């Protein structure tokens, strides 16, 4: 468990609201005022911690490289046919123990990896905007507080000093309400007799209990959380508890209860001033103060309330920590998009430049390799696709079989990968041990559009053709044909897998522009296709061949289906945050 510093206003507001509700339920008017003040200040501190500090469950090291992008990196792997691309996914020799230890991770954690969003400590643009707003609000509150302090200091110079005892100065003012500030007491010049005596003793209690220091500390907490309405409410409750505490001191010192309360009624008036940094003899709500003075406390009941509040406070704080706790995976330094620069036999110095183009994505503990063989514009292309689980654990990268993958970071934008080619794999070079060098690149826009359309294959409902269609006929074991329409694109490809239950999948076929001509005719890249609707969920697709002048037409039969979940998981390597 570690912690990240940031601004999480919803968490802080929710916790402050829960703590205030608890305060109203079993603290307010039920505890002695000193304990209530500690509860209020503690609640403000807890809300501040929840607002600015977020617990993070982390596996190991989460250090990010200087340049990292969510969907950035590419490398064309080796293969000249759809089946070859899957076979060419790099693997490396590993121990039997590593295979066994990774097997459980690969087969059980995949669904969770896809559904849990792993947050990163990167400061996003929206966070920066919110940070500026928070700083502006905090500065505004602090400036207003400073203005009040300067105004109160000015009162010392403009009003007449009448007495000084125990380093406490008393001033006569033209205000209608007595109040204190630091070690200064301001009394209305019109007060006299017993009312003036009560007001002076009341403000002396405020000074003796250092209430001004409590208000200063609470005001800083308010400034930090100026956007939290419940913190402002708790601050006002703190001032009320201070007044109740001094009222109780007056009763314990022998003041006549009835005459003291009558003095409060005479002095209490709304002066029209909102001064946060003062304590006042006539502060409202006066009704609660009088009720509190006349109440007798049952100490047994008070202890029960304290125990109940302590248990509830612990539960609320723990629940806030649990629900605000983020899960952050160990950062894979290869996350992003890469392009293959060269490939060679490890024991040979001759470097082969790949004849194909592609993007290789790492992300979400997945690898996704997209290669194209023929390309006529941005998205009309003959493509080959492959991918597999590639978890990064404790600083080690594994392939789908649990073998350790050996890579070397030349710099943050270049790395070399060494892998062992088994008998089922095909590569651009001969030999069992392969070395390839890849560079970090921005992903091809056309490739990103294609991959994103596949990633959201079943979301487009703009016309009756959209969605995933599966071939009626099974071409061969482990291979399924699909026809997919999404976001103005179509995909017609064969989808296959290897390695039994382990996630290692591939596809090869055509992608291109798609337009609806009418209910029975569609445009596919460079030619029209004919659609025969057997019903809403079954179609036959007739596509002319390249030599369509001879009248040769291929016919495919499809039925509505859903996009394969494991295929989408592979694509999540390019879109780990979606």
Image (spheres, rainbow, N blue to C red):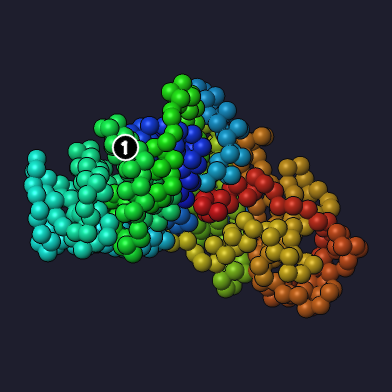
Q: Can you see residue 192?
A: yes
Depth check: 11 or 466 in front? 11
- Number of marks drawn: 1
For the N terminus, which image quadrant? top left
Q: Residue furthest front?
A: 193
Q: Can you see residue 180?
A: no
In percent of width and height, residue 15 lies at: 46, 43
Q: Secondary structure at mark 1?
A: loop
Which residue in the protein does label 1 denote? 256
Depth check: 285 or 251 in front? 251
In percent of width and height, residue 205 lies at: 23, 40
- On screen, residue 322 versus residue 468, left or right, reads left
Q: Tell me the residue at 13%/61% (across/down).
A: 159
Residue 379: image quadrant is bottom right
Depth check: 333 or 303 in front? 303
Where 256 sits versus 463, above or below? above
Depth check: 238 or 107 in front? 238
In percent of width and height, residue 502 lies at: 62, 36
């Amino acid at each position: 468990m570690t912690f990240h510093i940031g601004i999480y206003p919803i968490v802080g507001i929710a916790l402050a609201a829960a703590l205030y509700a608890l305060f109203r339920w079993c603290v307010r008017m039920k505890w002695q005022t000193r304990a209530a003040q500690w509860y209020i200040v503690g609640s403000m501190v807890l809300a501040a911690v929840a607002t600015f500090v977020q617990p993070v469950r982390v596996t190991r090291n989460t250090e990010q490289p200087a340049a990292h992008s969510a969907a950035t990196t590419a490398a064309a792997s080796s293969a000249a046919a759809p089946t070859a691309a899957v076979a060419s996914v790099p693997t490396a020799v590993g121990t039997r123990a590593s295979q066994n230890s990774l097997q459980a991770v690969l087969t059980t954690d995949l669904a969770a990896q896809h559904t849990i969003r792993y947050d990163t400590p990167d400061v996003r643009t929206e966070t920066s905007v919110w940070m500026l707003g928070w700083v502006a609000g905090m500065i505004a509150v602090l400036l207003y507080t400073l203005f009040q302090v300067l105004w109160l200091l000015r009162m010392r110079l403009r009003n007449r000093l009448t007495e000084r005892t125990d380093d406490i100065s008393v001033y006569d003012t033209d205000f209608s309400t007595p109040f204190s500030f630091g070690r200064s007491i301001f009394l209305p010049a019109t007060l006299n007799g017993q009312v003036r005596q009560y007001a002076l003793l009341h403000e002396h209690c405020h000074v003796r209990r250092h209430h001004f220091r409590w208000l200063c500390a609470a005001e800083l907490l308010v400034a930090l959380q100026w956007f939290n309405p419940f913190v402002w409410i708790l601050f006002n409750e703190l001032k009320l508890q201070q007044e109740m505490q001094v009222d109780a001191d007056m009763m314990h010192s022998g003041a006549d209860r009835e005459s003291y309360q009558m003095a409060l009624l005479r002095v209490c008036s709304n002066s029209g001033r909102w001064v946060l940094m003062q304590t006042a003899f006539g502060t409202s709500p006066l009704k609660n103060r009088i009720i509190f003075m006349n109440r007798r406390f049952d100490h047994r009941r008070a202890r029960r309330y304290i125990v109940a509040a302590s248990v509830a406070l612990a539960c609320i704080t723990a629940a806030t920590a649990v629900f605000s706790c983020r899960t952050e995976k160990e950062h894979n330094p290869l996350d992003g998009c890469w392009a293959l620069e060269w490939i060679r036999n490890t024991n040979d110095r001759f470097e082969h430049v790949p004849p194909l183009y592609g993007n290789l994505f790492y992300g979400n503990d997945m690898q996704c390799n997209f290669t194209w063989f023929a390309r006529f514009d941005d998205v009309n292309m003959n493509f080959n696709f492959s991918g597999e689980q590639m978890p990064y654990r404790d600083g080690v990268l594994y392939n789908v079989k649990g073998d350790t993958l050996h890579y070397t970071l030349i710099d943050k934008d270049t790395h070399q990968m060494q892998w062992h080619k088994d008998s089922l794999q095909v590569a651009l070079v001969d030999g069992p041990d392969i070395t390839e060098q890849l560079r970090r690149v921005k992903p091809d826009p056309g490739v990103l559009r294609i991959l994103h359309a596949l990633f959201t294959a079943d979301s487009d409902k703009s016309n009756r053709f959209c969605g995933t269609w599966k071939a009626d006929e099974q071409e061969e074991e482990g291979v399924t044909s699909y026809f997919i329409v999404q976001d103005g694109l179509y995909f017609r490809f064969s989808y296959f897998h290897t390695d039994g239950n382990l996630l290692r999948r591939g596809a090869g076929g055509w992608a291109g522009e798609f337009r609806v001509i009418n209910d029975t005719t569609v445009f596919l890249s460079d030619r029209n296709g004919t659609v025969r609707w057997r019903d809403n969920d079954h179609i036959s697709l007739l596509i002319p061949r390249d030599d369509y002048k001879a009248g040769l037409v291929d016919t495919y039969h499809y039925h509505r289906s859903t996009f394969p979940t494991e295929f989408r998981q592979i694509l999540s390597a390019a879109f780990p945050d979606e």
